[in-house]
Amino acid sequence: MKRSDLMFVAWATALTATLGSLFYSEFLGYTPCEWCWYQRILMYPLVIIYGVALLKNEKNTALPGLILSGAGVLVSTYHYSVQKVPALKTPGGSCGTVPCTVEYVNYLGFITIPFLAGTAFIIIFISHLLLLRQKEQ
């Protein structure tokens, strides 16, 4: 894959995730929990970072994206675990106005919002790693 294609994949994934999160909160009225906000804080700048890198065709501009997407993978994995692993669920626990264990969506019994965010972060992270790998070759 060409460098510009990899940056486009990262940018398009970040844009889709951002628009998806805004759709869930603004159109469907799902109030984000605290961990959802952390994921948004890590995802939203990626649209700008990879958009600028794509326009400039400069992969070094996108380096902060690797850090943000890597952190996003960790945050999403933890949030998904809080939703799905009974030992991590605290009865009546809340991490803000909405409990972090709330599953607004649960497609096929395992696809929740943190799962979707985690998938996006993984796609972006892997795209960036492939971008860096091209530099070495």
Image (cartoon, grey):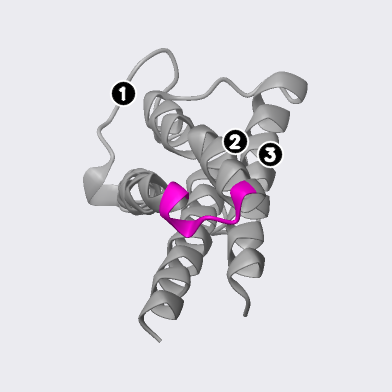
Q: Indicate the quadrant where residue 51 lies.
A: top right
Q: Position of residue 88 (x, y in %)?
A: 24, 45
Q: Which residue corresponds to mark 1?
A: 92
Along the line of sight, the residue nearer the viewer: 88 or 122: 122
Mark-to-mark CA distance, 1 and 3: 28 Å
Is residue 95 toward the left or the right of residue 99 in the image? left
Q: Position of residue 83 (x, y in %)?
A: 39, 45
Q: Residue at x 46, y 50 (%)?
A: 62
Which of the numbered marks, if any, corresponds to residue 104? Answer: 2
Q: Which residue corresponds to mark 3?
A: 20
Q: Residue at x 46, y 61 (%)?
A: 122
Amino acid bearing label 1: Gly
Q: Which residues are magenta?
A: 56-61
Q: Position of residue 10 (x, y in %)?
A: 58, 57
Q: Residue at x 51, y 41 (%)?
A: 49
Question: Which label sits in the foreground, 1 or 3?
Answer: 3
User: Can residue 108 be spotted in the picture?
Assistant: no
